[in-house]
Image (cartoon, rainbow, N blue to C red):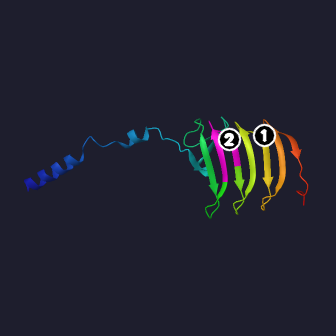
C-alpha cells in the first residue's frame, strides 16, 4: 500500500514541473494586432477619437473589412494610428462599387464618387479637411 501512495506521489510531483508558463505570464505578453480584421472587432475611444483593436489609446493601424452574409465584401477601410486614413470603399451585394472616399486622419479629403448598382456614376464631390468644396453633377444621374 505504501508503494501505491509513493508511486502516486511521484506522478503528481512529476506533473508539477516549472517548465509550464503561467496564465499571467501569457496574459502579460503584448498581442500583435492583425493587419487585416473584421471592422466589428474594432472599438472606438471617444476621448482620443480613434479606433483600436484591443487596447483603448493604442490606435489601430491596418485594414478592416465587412462582409455580406454570402461572404462577398461589403466595406473596406484603412487606418493609421487609430484614424481612418486612405481609401474607404463600399460595395453593393452584386460586387459593384457603391462608394469610394478618401480620408486623411479621420477627415474626408479629395474625391468622393458614388455609383448606382449598375455601375453608373450618380454623385461626385470634392472635399478638403472634412468640408465639401464642390459637387460635380453629371448628365443623366438624377432620376
Dominant secondary-structure state across the stretch colored magenta: strand
Q: On the rendered structure, is 34 left or right of 113?
A: left
Residue 143, image quadrant: bottom right
**Residues packed near mark 2 inside 10 Å, few (<14), some (14 to 19) or many (20 plus):** many
Depicted 139 relative to depicted 50: above or below: below
Q: Which secondary structure lies at badge 2?
A: strand
Q: Nearer the viewer, residue 26 or 87?
A: 87
State which tag comes first along the sequence, 1 or 2.
2
Q: Nearer the viewer, residue 93 or 141?
A: 141
**Residues packed near mark 1 inside 10 Å, few (<14), some (14 to 19) or many (20 plus):** some
| Residues at marks 1 and 2, CA–CA distance in whole angstroms | 14 Å
Depicted 79 relative to depicted 90: above or below: above
Q: Nearer the viewer, residue 10 or 113?
A: 113
Residue 3 percent across, percent down from the top left: 8, 54
Q: On the rendered structure, is 31 left or right of 16?
A: right
Q: Which secondary structure lies at badge 1?
A: strand
Depicted 24 relative to depicted 118: above or below: above
Q: On the rendered structure, is 17 left or right of 55?
A: left
For the point 89% across and 50% down, the residue is 137
Q: Nearer the viewer, residue 109 or 46?
A: 109
Badge 1 is on which residue?
110
Badge 2 is on which residue?
84
Residue 19 percent across, percent down from the top left: 28, 41
Q: On the rendered structure, is 117 left or right of 52?
A: right
Residue segment shown in magenta:
75-88
Q: Quadrant of the N terminus?
A: bottom left
Amino acid at each position: 500500500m505504501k508503494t501505491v501512495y509513493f508511486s502516486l506521489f511521484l506522478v503528481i510531483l512529476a506533473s508539477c514541473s516549472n517548465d509550464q508558463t503561467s496564465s499571467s505570464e501569457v496574459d502579460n505578453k503584448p498581442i500583435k494586432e492583425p493587419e487585416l480584421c473584421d471592422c466589428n472587432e474594432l472599438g472606438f475611444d471617444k476621448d482620443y477619437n480613434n479606433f483600436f483593436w484591443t487596447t483603448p489609446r493604442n490606435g489601430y493601424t491596418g485594414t478592416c473589412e465587412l462582409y455580406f452574409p454570402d461572404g462577398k465584401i461589403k466595406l473596406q477601410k484603412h487606418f493609421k494610428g487609430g484614424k481612418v486614413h486612405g481609401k474607404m470603399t463600399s460595395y453593393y451585394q452584386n460586387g459593384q462599387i457603391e462608394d469610394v472616399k478618401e480620408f486623411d486622419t479621420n477627415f474626408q479629403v479629395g474625391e468622393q464618387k458614388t455609383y448606382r448598382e449598375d455601375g453608373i456614376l450618380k454623385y461626385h464631390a470634392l472635399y478638403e479637411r472634412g468640408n465639401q468644396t464642390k459637387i460635380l453633377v453629371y448628365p443623366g444621374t438624377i432620376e
